[in-house]
């Protein structure tokens, strides 16, 4: 297993710098809109919170594990929104913790609303390089030693259009610019030791196939310069606004089975299982993901109002 840990770290280290990693990846992205796009803040009629835990590539020593939490809601008669995000991501001996404050402003456009959002946050990076097993003690890639805590301010933006309970589309750059010692505030974060710019495009639609069945296709496209383009393509079926089951395909990575249960107007829970299709399937038994969500202010609502996205 130590050999696998070494292989994983070599992939991370040689692909770019130690922390040139992607934003934390989740399969149930359709219920983590704020994490992807700050313009999502306040798009629901009530304040809501979502928590998610992901354990990736089970049995693979040093494989990623991720925890995310978010809360957001509307202000000023639904003209504005605020939200806060937190995530902790660990891959091998490196750890990344992110905090983000999000603000959105929306305008009525056609049948829906067009929202513009900004994010201001902090990312803290740590790495226990001394815990690695390696042979070449003189390799300069290990020369910095342990990184005990580097905090980097970063800022992002997004746009989001949605028609309530019908469809949505959004584009975001969660980290548009950042500040790093020696570089200052820079739009050219590709020179950063810790940050990389991610471009994300999302969209989804809700079809009513019958009185009790709704169909929910959705997509998430991700692009990172100097990395392969990736797409998540999902198709879900919701029965009686209570149980939703679906399949996703993540290009070059996994086939995902998901199920969600809307226990009440306020409470929902979801589970996702990734079946790895890349060569890593020889070393892992897939990935597990649990999502819990709660919408405030819906507890005593008689009419059933589930979350579609």
Image: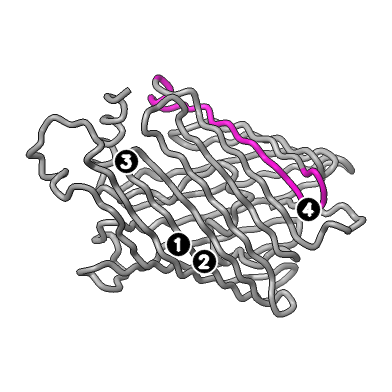
Mark 2 crowdedness (10 Å alpha carbons): few <14, some 14-19, many ≥20: many
| Horizontal side, residue 82 vs residue 133: left or right | right
Q: Nearer the viewer, mark 2 or mark 4?
A: 4
Q: Residue at x 61, y 49 (%)?
A: 51
Disc 1 designates what residue?
173
Q: Which mark is residue 266?
A: 4
Q: Nearer the viewer, mark 4 or mark 1?
A: 4
Q: Are marks 4 and 3 in contact (CB under 8 Å)?
A: no
Find residue 265 and report its horizontal and vertical position in percent.
82, 52
> In whole angstroms, how far apart are the C-alphas of marks 4 and 1?
30 Å
| Horizontal side, residue 115 vs residue 138: left or right | right
> In whole angstroms, how far apart are the C-alphas of marks 2 and 4?
27 Å
**Magenta segment range?**
262-282
Disc 3 designates what residue?
93
Q: SS at mark 1?
A: strand
Disc 2 designates what residue?
158
Question: Is 119 part of what is drawn in magenta?
Answer: no
Q: Nearer the viewer, mark 4 or mark 3?
A: 3
Q: Is residue 128 above or below residue 255?
A: below
Near-viewer residue (88 or 154): 88
Q: Reading the chain from its start, which is encountered first: label 1 or label 3?
A: 3
Q: Is residue 199 above or below residue 39?
A: above
Q: SS at mark 2?
A: strand
Q: Nearer the viewer, mark 3 or mark 2?
A: 3
Seen as rendered, the residue at the extreme bottom is 76
> In whole angstroms, how far apart are the C-alphas of marks 1 and 2?
6 Å
């Amino acid at each position: 297993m130590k050999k696998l840990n070494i292989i994983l770290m070599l992939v991370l280290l040689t692909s770019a710098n130690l922390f040139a990693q992607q934003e934390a990846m989740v399969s149930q992205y359709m219920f983590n809109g704020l994490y992807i796009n700050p313009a999502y803040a306040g798009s629901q009629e009530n304040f809501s919170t979502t928590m998610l835990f992901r354990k990736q590539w089970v049995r693979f020593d040093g494989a990623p594990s991720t925890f995310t939490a978010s809360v957001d809601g509307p202000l000023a008669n639904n003209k504005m929104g605020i939200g806060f995000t937190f995530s902790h991501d660990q891959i091998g001996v490196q750890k990344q913790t992110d905090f983000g404050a999000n603000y959105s402003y929306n305008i009525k456009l056609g049948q829906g609303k067009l929202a513009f959002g900004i994010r201001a946050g902090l990312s803290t990076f740590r790495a226990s390089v001394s815990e690695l097993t390696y042979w070449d003690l003189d390799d300069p890639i290990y020369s910095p030693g342990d990184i005990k805590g580097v905090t980097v301010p970063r800022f992002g933006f997004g746009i989001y259009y949605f028609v309530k309970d019908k469809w949505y589309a959004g584009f975001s750059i969660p980290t548009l610019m950042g500040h790093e010692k020696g570089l200052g505030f820079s739009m050219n974060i590709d020179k950063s030791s810790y940050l990389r710019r991610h471009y994300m495009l999302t969209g989804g639609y809700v079809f009513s196939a019958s009185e009790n069945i709704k169909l929910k296709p959705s997509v998430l496209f991700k692009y990172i310069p100097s990395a392969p383009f990736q797409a998540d393509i999902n198709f879900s079926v919701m029965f009686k606004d209570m149980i939703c089951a679906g399949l996703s395909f993540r290009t070059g990575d996994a086939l995902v089975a998901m199920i969600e249960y809307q226990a009440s107007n306020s409470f929902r829970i979801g589970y996702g299982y990734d079946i790895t299709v890349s060569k890593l399937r020889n070393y892992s038994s897939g990935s597990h993901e649990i999502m819990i969500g709660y919408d405030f202010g819906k507890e005593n609502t008689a009419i059933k109002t589930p979350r579609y996205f």
